[in-house]
Image (spheres, grey):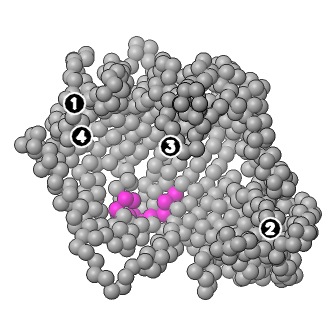
Amino acid sequence: MKNRILFVPILMLLAVFGRAAAPETILPPTTFAVVSVPDMNAARAAWSRTPMVRMWNDKEMAAFAGKLENAFREKVLAEVEEKANFKFSEYWNLAQGQATMGLTLIPGEQKPGMYLLVDAGKKSKGLAEKIGKLRETLVENEVPHKRHRIRGTDAISITPPNDEFDGMSVYIGQAGSLFIVTNHEQLHEQIVALHQGAGGKSLAKVPGFAARHRAQFKNALAYGWLDFAVVVEKGLEAAETFEDPDAEPAFGEPTVDGVITALGLKGLRSISFSAHQDKDGELIDLFVDVPEASRRGLLALFAPDAEAAGPPSFVDANVTSFARFRRNGQAAWKVFTGMLAEITPAAPMALGALDGFAQQNDPNFSFKEQIIDTLGDDFIMMGMAQPNRGNDLANLISSSTLFMFKSRKPAVTLGALQTIIKLAVPVPAESREFLGRTIHSYDISGEGGDTGLHLSIAGGYLILSSSAKAIEDHLRGPGKDAQPLAKSAVLEKAAAKVGGMKGAFAYENQQHMLGPIFKMLKNNPNLIEQTLDNLPIGPGQEIDPDTGLPVAPNFSDWLDFKLLPDFAKIKKYLHVTVSGVEVNEAGIRFRTFAPTPPALK
């Protein structure tokens, strides 16, 4: 039992530093996945400057935040630390400089090598003391372990008891100020050698990684890189071990290699991300390294056309969210059906069967002619502001989002879609006129009210929503004093940070989105518990002996919503976020930017 308990602090130690990543000059060149925080002190400082953290630390949030933090310390952290004889904060504070976690290939080994590197900087002496105490604890508790001398550095290896981790050993050591944890002695020695400048080629010299480092990782607070070609290769090798080499594949049966090829994943070279912060705000940058010449399948399907994707004039600044995707409908459908046909020849037949089923209700129905051939190249999603959402959780989370599809023949598209809906929804639509337009409503739940499925057409768009009120608000048009979102000064400036508004673009207003939710929870602090009281009984759930009903967890011990301040006192921390997509010959780039709220500058 002592052995088992002792291994907990080792795993906790790994988890503490597992968020970080290391300098590329000391990483093996066979690394295929890495996550990095180049400077932990800089990252901690940047984190403390983010608006959400500043809001959490605001004195107005002290009562609510303090109760949640105390509950976590007393009910979770204290118990773990007591059982494991492990202080989370002591190890967390040792991370001073660069830190790394990654996966690498080891010659002659099937399983990947795993490493964790943390630079303790000026606290290297404290790190040495921690490792020394670990050795003493291993001896005192008679835990089997070995001591190693690796290129002039000390290391210990521990194998978890009872083969709980498939016999994997953990190697723990220190080289200068660098804390090193690996799962293989050969890997441990390689990293120490690279750290000493005697290890030869490192990840920094690998062309694919080096290119992304130059283009994306400089000055990043954190970054990550995945060599997707290795993932595909190892995935195919693993699939082969489960296949019978003598078996003849059945007609139409997909193969792993065929699926990966059809999806276009063989053309995907790498995926990388980075996080940045400056005086203007925070930026998340994701790059999909898939050259245009090898872009097919899913990667071709979701690559938008270079058309304007900013908010149209009918979108006012009061929306909670807005997203627009420009893609030729017929071209996208051709890519999609070609991909399915490549996976299995049976796919086109399955799609063709839809016509047969639908023609039982409409003999003239043709999915391709009435839906696909009528699609335009504009797809919009818009969250409508709903200041009064009622006082129950259903209203709190119910969607007030509009989905809009540009159509060359909106009435034809609508009619064909209604034919398809009849196959799944037994009740007929209720149609009513509203401001010269017709709204068709399907009561899918059978409970009536605003929720369900609602459809209409306006301005050349087919409009769908689960909220009839949202469609009505859109058909009314912007109010007299409403300002178009397109003319928002903050929108144009923020959009420049994500490559502009072409192809695909998204916007979210945090105040409009979270304000009503915040106010509802404060005015109805028992809302979540009351809702959970009505849920079906789950495994291990406590039952009230008097009523026989399930007892909901007492969330107020953690989340006491009545302690929330008035929303007006903290809304200054909430602003907007924008996202954009840029497609070029080299790949597809996704960026999300959160500008610093004006009140915090």
Residue 478 in sight here: yes
Amino acid found under the numbered disc labelled 3: Ser
Residue highlighted by disc 1: 427
In the rendered image, the residue lying farthest to the top is 480
Tag nearer the camera, 4 or 3: 4
Q: Nearer the viewer, residue 100 or 205?
A: 100
Residue highlighted by disc 2: 3
Label 3 close to label 1 by CB (< 8 Å): no
- The residue that appears at 61% across and 86% down in the rendered structure is 108
**Occupied quadrant, residue 50:** top right
**C-alpha distance separating marks 4 and 1:** 9 Å
User: Is residue 290 rendered magenta in the image?
Assistant: yes
Tag nearer the camera, 4 or 2: 2
Residue highlighted by disc 3: 579
Q: Taking 459 as reference, is 127 above or below it?
A: below
Q: Position of residue 450 (x, y in %)?
A: 35, 22
Other-residue count near label 2 (Cα within 10 Å), few / some / many at <14 / 14–19 / ≥20: some
Point out which mark residue 526 bears: none
Q: Position of residue 445 (x, y in %)?
A: 33, 30
Point out which mark residue 424 bears: 4
Label 3 close to label 2 by CB (< 8 Å): no
**C-alpha distance separating marks 3 and 1:** 39 Å
- The residue that appears at 39% across and 46% down in the rendered structure is 503
Label 4 close to label 2 by CB (< 8 Å): no
Circle 1: element type: loop
Image position of 123 (left or right of 347): right
